[in-house]
Amino acid sequence: MARYPRGQHPARPAGTGARRGVSAFRPAVVPMPRFRRAVSSVPLQPGQGQAVIGAGGGAQVTLGPAGSGTIWYPAQVTVSTTTGLQTGLDTSLCAVYLGPAGVPTVLQGNVFGGNGVLAVALPPLAPGLFVIAVWSGGHPGDVAAVNITGTMDALAF
């Protein structure tokens, strides 16, 4: 019989040895009915997203609330590209939309130069409604970023 130093034994096929029949550890799941307490005026999160501008000069970032009982109250949308931040020579256009299921539907405003701040007057966003930033005319390979600030309501337990 071959002897191996402690911790250096060969791997065994699954389901053999002392741990046969033992499943992997799974963290506890909190049931939905336990989320009863509403928390209001929490800083909006996660309100950041990025995309790489493709060969055609376009990119799209879609952000919105997720989870039952989560409502976003966005106040402003900040958009930027790496070229615009470094040199100020960005000629791209970023159009900010509101839409269901990530489909740009209602134009909220345009940011010229692909960089800037757009103060938005959006309705409260429930899950399924998104803020969509669409860049056109950007430099391929640049990183386009969106930051949405505001508050949100969420459920806690």
Image (cartoon, grey):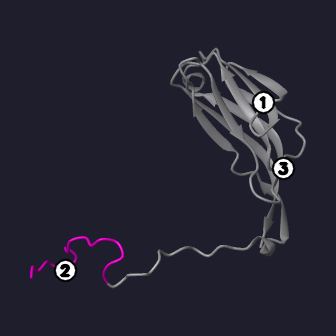
| Left or right: 86, with 113 as reference point | left
Amino acid type, label 3: Ala
Find disc 3 in the rendering and name its residue. Answer: 126
The location of residue 14, given as percent across then percent down, is 34, 72
Give the SS element for disc 1: loop
Upstream in the sequence, badge 2 or badge 1? Answer: 2
Distance (Cα) linking label 3 and label 1: 16 Å
Q: Residue 137 or 24: which is nearer the viewer?
A: 24
The chief SS type of the magenta part is: loop
The location of residue 132, given as percent across then percent down, is 74, 34
Residue 126's place in the image compared with 20, above or below, is: above
Distance (Cα) linking label 2 and label 3: 55 Å
Amino acid type, label 1: Pro
The location of residue 96, given as percent across then percent down, is 77, 29
Find disc 1 in the rendering and name its residue. Answer: 104
Distance (Cα) linking label 2 and label 1: 60 Å
Residue 63 part of the magenta-drawn span: no
Q: Which region shows up in magenta?
A: 1-17
- As drawn, the label of residue 30 is none
Give the SS element for disc 2: loop
The location of residue 4, given as percent across then percent down, is 13, 78
- Who's the residue at 85% across and 34% down the image? 120
- Who's the residue at 66% across and 30% down the image? 60
Find disc 2 in the rendering and name its residue. Answer: 6
Q: Quadrant of the C terminus?
A: bottom right
Q: Quadrant of residue 142?
A: top right
Residue 16 part of the magenta-drawn span: yes
Numbered label tally:
3
